[in-house]
Image: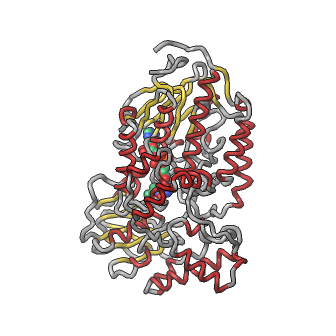
Amino acid sequence: MAGQHDHDVDVEVLVIGAGVVGIYALYRALDAGFSAQTLEAGDGVGGVWYWNRYPSARFDSESYTYAYIFSKELFDEWRWKEEFATQPEIESYLNHVVDRFDLRQHIRTGEKVVSADFDETAHVWTVRTAKGSVVRARWIISATGGLSVPNYPDIDGLADFQGQAHHTGAWPHTPVDFAGKRVAIIGNGPSGAQLLPAIVDTVAQVDLYQRTPTWTTPLNNKPLTDERQAWLSDNWDDVVKILTTSPTGFMHEPAGKFSTADSPEERQAFYEKIWKSPGFAKLTSNYYDMTTNREVNLEFCDFLAGKIRAIVKDPVTAERLIPKDHLFGAKRPPFVTDYFESFNKPNASLISLKETPFVRVDATGIETTEKHREYDIIVFATGFDFGTGALTRMGVKGREGLDLSTDWEDGPSDFAGFSAHRLPNFFFPGGPHGAGGGNYPRYSQDQVDWITGTLVHAREHGFDLFEPTAAQEDQWMTMVETLAPQSIFSAEHSHYYGANVEGKVRKFLLNPGGRGKLHEILGEMTSTEDYNGAFAPATEPVSAS
Ligand SMILES: Cc1cc2nc3c(=O)[nH]c(=O)nc-3n(C[C@H](O)[C@H](O)[C@H](O)COP(=O)(O)OP(=O)(O)OC[C@H]3O[C@@H](n4cnc5c(N)ncnc54)[C@H](O)[C@@H]3O)c2cc1C
């Protein structure tokens, strides 16, 4: 039922997307007493963990740091099997949360939003789906995902292939039978690097097509022990505090030192320790100056190159696997078990597209400048249209003719990574400039909590229009543009700059100021009752529904 001032809407809060962020946004909206509903394009909930069901898809954030932390009861009743859980377990968890908090009745799956139009008089959004459903809502929370629109390579003849072709991010629900098949994996990012070891012992032949080598390091996964689970439960308040305040949203211990504190021998010993550390700790527990001092980073790259040469038996393949053109961390590094080891199997090979580019795909396989190879299955592990992909494909039209599909062609302009001037009452947690490059749900939890608090504030003060002012957006975007060049990410190589998508403008798509800047700028906005001009008083209801 709509709220007191919302007789002209179907729901007060419409959430779009039922991934980890949308599920939380729905929970918080209902918990705060709003009428709320979710529209989700997929036929099930889970977002990334619904779509990416390729073999061995798994977290590289520790399971319990990625999972929700709003309920200790939820934590205590769910037992992750491994430090880094696999997709089926994560999908089950998200379904469990939906049922545990009675959210399913509010979620409509199979409903892809194709347009969203803002009525400037009534201050109401009208949303339409591909199936023809129409929902009128006061507030939209578009949790449509940063990595939810698969990106395909631009190769002649892709449609001609007569075998099976699958993108890792749109994987079929019926398991793909790899036994005895000839397989091409295109892409060596996190998904391609996870898939290769998972199938290499099953297939007849697998060729991994690599555009640019990446600094892949071991995930160092292990079972989640009873002791660890008990420790987390006993120290829950501290765990929550670290996850909600640490710059990256992880629990890894910082190195506590700069590289200059150690001798060359001590540094090598330290790098050994880092090599054996779990997941993202290779970045978050590394020397403080690893991402700011080129010389230190190059020394670590040398160490990693030595590891690759020691693991991969064929020296030519080893050299091809060693990045020569970017520093560690300049691209989001994959953390994977047995990736390099896979190339020692007689049925696995690496094809360097730098040396032998694609010519075309045809009915039976792939032709490069070297030769034609036949395949039964081609896997596109070619990533996503990061940050803006889903938002610009949803037919969003704001105030004064703002049309996201064209207005963001030169890069997104927003406030706080989840709202924008001329886009009233529309929030997009997890969108561009939202995440800081760390543990994703921890950033988006900050955002969703702030958004929910803002909706409660609006209700309490009789506001029905929230729109960051042009000045507020400028302040945020100036912060983004000023700090972006200081980030380690490479405009030439990183999908955080859109570099993986053909023709996409290269603009930095993360929040380079991290949690610190986010809270500082939000704090400034909320220092007055009307959020320094972002709120307007409520209009009279236009019509009764
Ligand atoms: C394979 C993989 C592994 C990852 N592992 C990690 C990890 O370990 N740690 C980490 O921090 N991050 C990881 N990520 C990043 C990941 O994007 C986030 O962790 C998180 O899943 C994002 O959640 P979300 O709810 O914002 O978006 P999503 O999970 O992408 O959900 C968005 C949902 O919106 C729906 N949607 C989109 N457009 C529309 C529309 N027009 N109408 C209706 N519905 C729509 C989509 O169908 C989707 O279900 C991973 C990403 C991938 C692809």
Q: Residue at x 30, y 66 (%)?
A: 364
| Residue drawn at x 45%, y 58% as measured from the top left | 63
**Is residue 50 in sight in this rendering?**
no
Residue 312: x %, y % from top left: 45, 83
In the image, residue 424 above or below residue 151: above
Q: Residue at x 58, y 29 (%)?
A: 456
Q: Position of residue 259 (x, y in %)?
A: 69, 76
Residue 524 visible in image: yes
Q: In the figure, residue 472 lies in which quadrant?
A: top right
User: In the image, is residue 365 above or below residue 469?
Assistant: below
Quadrant location, the C terminus: top left
Residue 373 image position (x, y, % from top left): 34, 73
Closer to the camera in the image, 453 or 53: 453
Residue 132, given in percent of the width and then of the height, sits at 38, 29
Q: Is residue 41 left or right of residue 353?
A: left
Relative to residue 152, is residue 268 drawn left or right?
right
302 or 112: which is nearer to us? 302
Residue shown at 46% from the left, 51% from the top: 67
Along the line of sight, the residue nearer the viewer: 273 or 117: 273
Q: Quadrant of the N terminus?
A: top left
